[in-house]
Image (cartoon, rainbow, N blue to C red):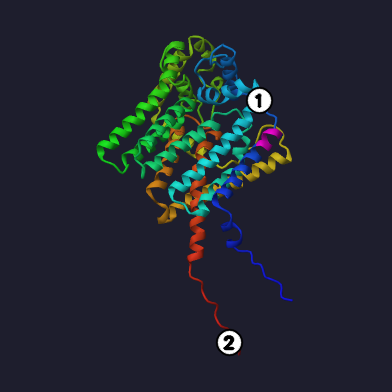
Amino acid sequence: MNMPRYRFSQSTCLTQWSEVRLLGLILMGALVVRVAIVLYLDIVPVSDYAGYHNMAINLLSGRGLTDGESFAMLSAGYPLFVLVPIFAVFGDNLLAAQLGNALLGVLTTWLIYLIVREVGAGRIGRLVAPLIFAFYLPSWIYAEYLAKENLMTPLMLGIVLLSVRCLRDASVWVSLLLGVLIGLLAITGNAGLAILPVAFLALAMMPISLRGRGLRMGLVGLVAMLVIAPWLMRNDAVIGEPILNSNGGFNLYLGNNPAANGFFVSIADTPRGATWPQLREEGEVIASNTLKTEAIDWIKRNPSDFLALAVTKGRLFWMPPVHEGKGVQSRVEVMTRVAWLGQYLFICTLAIGSVAFVQLRTRKTGLLWLSIVGYTAVHMIFYVIFRYREPVMPLMILLSALTIEHLLTLRKTFPQVAPRRQIDV
């Protein structure tokens, strides 16, 4: 009796699954692993994470949006737009906030799919990109932390998505939404505004008249300012200046002083350490402006050191994660760090490799690279913390997915060499 033969082929597996269904599975996987992580880990918020937590709790309790020591030192977007709504519904529940971070991770995964589709990737690239991020280890871990990067990342990706779309879609709605996202990003993490040149370059290349492009740029700027304006007015009333936050001078000084080494350095370890408490008592705006002046003076006196330090910061920003954690590391932590290193090298190698292929050097991928370069450059002025690069790692993942798809396409189209016939002697 002849039994039917079944062959495992693309037609009997992936192609019979709709792209929407496969994407749904990827998004579900992204959610499951992040929820599992926040249920497994139990890390108490410290430093900035504790500050964001305090800001949300203090606002809900009627004490205002303050971390307990300052009113605008930390960026307000993450506690205001994420933690406050969650705590208003679930109370001071850390797990609820972490689950909210997990959902933001799923949102980021979906945005990666939308961007890679907008860039013009085929089916493989459109699915590989979100799949890589869904199982990108640092994005799991940061769901546990009350970090502003959880919100910064999807906001930056949203701006990149709309920027790329501007190259073919000149609708008013795209410009309106772009302005809203820029305003929200400014409040959430103004370092992300380093990608603004990408947005306005894309607006300048819209397929409409020169006058129309100018109007769209004006519309984006107007909407962004309308979003930011209430926060600027609040800060003007509370701390005396209409600024996004009061940490600009502080951060500039930490990255540019005689003790600076490229990484975050405690203010206590700088020449200002001994007098910082007294300066801080004069007010956060005065303290920030004083530190800004001192940082600029140091740069003017030491231009070569500043440039050398900037190069060092750029190198540190993209340094592979070979550092060790604090204290004694468990076997699980050691294995996780090794896996993270492997993922990082895999992603960056393929992303950089994309420039080797003419087909992948387009205006759209150019905008992705400009976003990465711009975001790197702003940290070369201030200082480096490894988590700061996480908002642009999705763009590296996008480029690596394009490389994977292109390599697979080349393999299919490369002519097969027929084996030589053997001659019996």
> Picture quarter containing residue 54?
top right
Q: Quadrant of the C terminus?
A: bottom right
Q: Nearer the viewer, residue 295 or 420?
A: 420
Circle 2 sits on which residue? Answer: 423
Q: Amino acid at mark 1?
A: Leu
Furthest residue in direction front, as rendered: 1
Q: Are marks 2 and 1 in contact (CB under 8 Å)?
A: no
Disc marking residue 375: none
Category of crowding for the residue at label 1, using alpha-carbon neighbours closer than 10 angstroms: few (below 14), some (14–19), many (at least 20): many
Indicate the position of residue 186 as horizontal and vertical percent values: 44, 27
Q: Nearer the viewer, residue 406 or 320?
A: 406
> Picture quarter containing residue 327?
top right
How far separated are the C-alphas under marks 2 and 1? 75 Å
Residue at the image position 47 percent from the left and 38 percent from the top:
157
Disc marking residue 94: 1
Indicate the position of residue 185 as horizontal and vertical percent values: 46, 29
In the figure, is residue 30 to the left or right of 404?
right
Is residue 257 visible in the rendered image? The answer is no
Q: Which residues are magenta?
A: 35-39
Is residue 259 covered in magenta? no
Q: Nearer the viewer, residue 2 or 88?
A: 2
Furthest residue in direction bottom, as rendered: 425
Q: Nearer the viewer, residue 351 or 295?
A: 351
In the figure, is residue 266 to the left or right of 253?
right
Q: Quadrant of the N terminus?
A: bottom right
Indicate the position of residue 305 as horizontal and vertical percent values: 43, 31
Q: Amino acid at mark 2?
A: Ile
